[in-house]
Image (cartoon, rainbow, N blue to C red):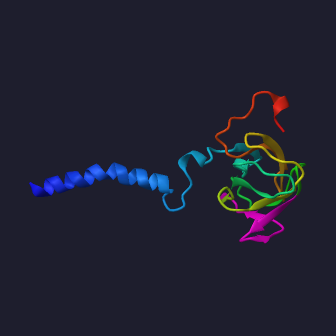
Amino acid sequence: MTIIKRGRRAIRWLPVLLAMLTVAGCGGWPPVQDLPGGGVDAESGRVVIDDIWVDGPHGITAGGSTPLRLAITNASPTADTLVGVSTPLAGRAVLEQNGHPVAGIALPASGFVDLEWRTGVELEGLRTSLIPGTYVPVTLRFAHAAPVTVRAAVGPLAVPEPQNPSTSA
């Protein structure tokens, strides 16, 4: 009978412990409400761009740099390469792998490349400040697939796309 009481005491403290871990940030994990909800999707033939977004949860000041997040699926039986990214809002876009600039990012045949949670494209020298919830045009160029232009959301992505075209970038 004493064992049951001790177990009940431990269970009573469980909600308090969980609340303390949530307030403490769980060892560096971001709060749930700050996690992006997904980005814009596009495709160029059999190359599919999933969840493209500009990482700027608090906005980005002019002159600054920020990662462009995206995932790419190459549904083609032929390998391709992301060879360039551009936007009129940045001085340049740098393709990176393992923290080093590269001429292209390989897209294996029938493969998937996740650049959404690590840097693969860095937008540098922003010409204007970016505000969360706005959309910016971004063009991706490939070695084989046709280029594709999308309107990428500036994060956090929980902000819905404005319905009035005059309010978007």
* Residue 21 drawn above or below residue 164: below
| Quarter occupied by the C terminus | top right
* Residue 156 drawn above or below residue 94: above
Instruction: Depth check: give the residue in front, 98 or 4.
Output: 4
Q: Is residue 10 magenta?
A: no
Q: Magenta residues: mostly which secondary structure? A: strand
Find residue 167 and report its image quarter: top right
Q: Residue furthest top?
A: 164
Where residue 112 sits in the image (x, y, percent)?
Answer: 65, 58
Q: What residue is at 54 percent from the left and 58 percent from the top?
A: 29
Instruction: Depth check: give the residue in front, 139 or 20.
Output: 20
Find residue 161 and report its image quarter: top right
Q: What residue is at 81 percent from the left and 58 percent from the top?
A: 65
- Start-end of magenta stretch: 92-112
Where residue 25 sits in the image (x, y, percent)?
Answer: 51, 56
Q: Is residue 110 magenta?
A: yes
Find residue 77 and report its image quarter: bottom right
Instruction: Depth check: give the residue in front, 63 or 78.
Output: 63
Residue 23 as seen in the image, left or right of residue 64: left
Q: What residue is at 73 percent from the left and 50 percent from the top?
A: 56
Where residue 30 sits in the image (x, y, percent)?
Answer: 56, 54
* Residue 142 drawn above or below residue 131: below
* Residue 44 drawn above or below residue 116: above
Where residue 32 sits in the image (x, y, percent)?
Answer: 54, 48
Residue 80 visible in the displayed image: no
Residue 44 visible in the displayed image: yes
